[in-house]
Amino acid sequence: MAGNKRDYYKVLGLSRDCTSDQIKREYRKLAHKYHPDVNNGDPESEEKFKEISEAYAVLSNEEKRRQYNQFGFSRSLFEDFDFGSVFSEFGFGDIFNTFFGSSFGSTFSSRSGGRRIKKGSDVNAEVRISFKESAYGVKKEIEYKVDDTCEVCRGKGSTADDGIVTCSECGGTGKVRTARQTLIGNIITTAACRTCMGTGEVIKDPCNKCRGKGYYRKKNKVKINIPAGIHDGDRLRVSGKGNSLGRNSVNGDLFVTINVVPYPGFERDGNEVLSKVEISFAQAALGCGLEVETLDGKEKVNIKPGTQPNDKIILKSRGMVQLNGYRRGDQIINIDVKVPTRLTGREKELLKEYAQIRKETVGN
């Protein structure tokens, strides 16, 4: 790139705290001054125009500008970015690709003919798993609808050897050039050919299965490994299982959202599992042994004499596995001491006797 070692702000003559309006205004002024058509193709003006166009392409986009401010120049600044739309308001159309396509062509184009490799859109799906499955991990089969590559024509759109011909409108380039009069002079721009939709080819004998598209809608099934420790709402990415666009394309990705079904009595807090157990006043005072439920099954715990309400018992390594890790959290059991609301006559006598021994006032 022309400006990969330059300060984009200095290129446009601006400070780093400049506004988007200032960036646009300064670029418009410099573009008028250095555009090659205005300067009769002067090499120095063309190089300067490349430089300011590159700077504007980055600084006019908020996300790219933040990336540049933090990390400086990198090739990732120019990935997944529609540069043509950036300059369309100035009448420059696809001018960025016109000037810099040779530098970045290998990133976006195939080696045969230099055509741009298209990527199909991503697909979203959901899967429900149990609380315990989220703790241990599980393999699930997902069924979803997707635009899949046609197996009859293998994505070409036609089964006939001569069913695909070179587009006569663009001559197979996939682009057409147009001239437009603007405030800064006559500008020549390139755009995707509307006849062939930028493919450079026209299907004259379309496939009966996909009707010439190279893909069709179908139900697809895929098995995914859901890792231990997955959280409710997490998304898993399955590369290459999204929609296809037929020939000269790669499939998008499948994103699966995990829905964890709540389990009665269990609650997750990070990698800890929270639960509770109810005991009586007598059990709290005298202690007892109880069987509680854990993710690993039933386990016996000891309630110490004199246990108070909201005391806790911690079972080490009985919680969730750390996602993409191996250590397990703990299970924390909260003690809930239940006070009886209905007593028999004998029970009341015993409690009154207990209160008298402890010299406690009871009753109304």
Image (cartoon, rainbow, N blue to C red):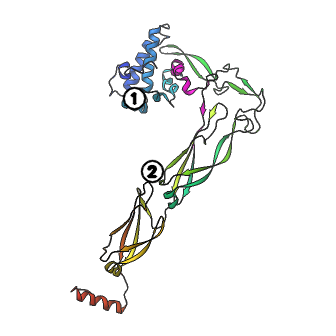
Instruction: Mark 2 or mark 1: name the one nearer the start of the chain.
Output: 1
Magenta run includes residue 130: no
Q: Relative to 45, say whether 222 is above or below.
A: below
Residue 50 as seen in the image, left or right of residue 204:
left
User: Rounded to the nearest whole Å, what is the CA distance between mark 2 and mark 1?
Assistant: 33 Å
Which stretch did the figure color magenta? 95-123
Residue 88 as seen in the image, left or right of residue 16:
right
Quadrant hosting residue 190: top right
Disc 1 packing (10 Å; few <14; some 14–19; many ≥20): some
The answer to which of 351 and 166 lies nearer the viewer is 351
* Secondary element at image label 2: loop
Q: Which residue is mark 2?
A: 325
Q: State the residue at coordinates (48%, 11%).
A: 36
Amino acid type, mark 1 = Tyr
Pinpoint residue 194: horizontal percent, then vertical percent: 64, 26
Pinpoint residue 119: horizontal percent, then vertical percent: 59, 34
Q: Which residue is mark 1?
A: 68
Pinpoint residue 353: horizontal percent, then vertical percent: 27, 90
- Inspect this view and state whether residue 274 appears: yes
* Secondary element at image label 1: helix
- Inspect this view and state whether residue 92 appears: no
* Residue 268: assigned label: none
Magenta run includes residue 114: yes
Foreground mark, 2 or 1, reads 2
Q: Relative to 188, say whether 360 is above or below.
A: below
